[in-house]
Image (cartoon, helix red, strand yellow):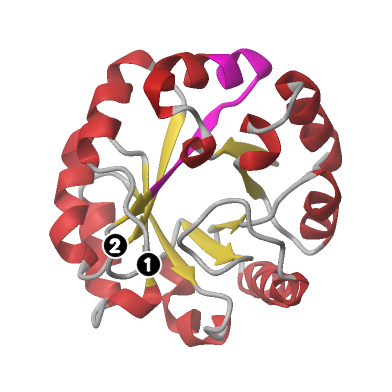
Amino acid sequence: MTLAPSILSADFSKLLEEVREVESFGAKWLHVDVMDGHFVPNMTFGPVVVEALRPHTRSVLDCHLMVNEPEKMVPWFIKAGADYITFHAEATRNPQALIESIKKSGKKAGISVKPKTPVESIAALLPILDLVLVMSVEPGFGGQSFMAETLQKAKWLASQKKQNHYSYLIEMDGGINAFTAQAAHASGVEVFVAGSAIFSAKDRKKAFDELERAIR
């Protein structure tokens, strides 16, 4: 089980300090939310942020591209030093080719689905994926409430993984806190993205530890 703090909720004016703080708590993954202002109504990081962080961290850089035409941006994040590159099923016409391109570069390939997108729509891609990201809020902004109905997607992915001996990780992002993380864990989630639950907490170490206990 892996806890991946989302730097979308960090203080951008001292991002490296924020990263080092959560790493001091034990974080081994960092979730990077990339938004283009078109696929979702918000704009955030570009590859330059990943490139700037890469020399200063050994953490897994888990980049989630919430962008139109991810084919154009994927090469930038490969070059910048991302470890996992996840794009949206809704944003591309040829997801298989993009997955294969990511994997050929030596990176891990993930696909994400919005809350209203049936997870069964990506069934044919499951054998070649390294990660499936279930959005438990509508993508675009942090701090939203958890959508419990998305747990059914995680359960389905877990059953498919077990039945077919697939190797992808099941990740969930949106509204994750110590309470919802327990439900996600019980549904088969393996990577838990938490932003405001950590970075907005008065006692960040305590919040991180509570999340860690919830997923054990």
Q: Residues within 10 Å of mark 2 (few under 14, many from 20)?
A: some
Residue 40: numbered disc: 1
Image position of 83 with respect to 144: above or below: above
> Which residue is denoted by mark 2 in the rendering?
37
- Which secondary structure, mark 1? loop
Q: Is residue 145 magenta?
A: no
Q: Quadrant of residue 88?
A: bottom left
Q: Is residue 208 left or right of residue 214?
A: left
For the point 71% across and 70% down, the residue is 147
> In the displayed structure, does residue 122 sit left or right of residue 118?
left
The range drawn in magenta is 21-33
Viewed as shown, does residue 207 lie left or right of 40?
right
Q: Does residue 63 lie above or below 164 as drawn?
A: above
Q: Is residue 22 magenta?
A: yes
Real-space Cα distance between discs 1 and 2?
A: 5 Å
Q: SS of the residue at dot 2?
A: loop
- State the quadrant of the N terminus: top right
Q: What's the residue at 60%, 41% (across, down)?
A: 195
Quadrant of the image containing the C terminus? top right
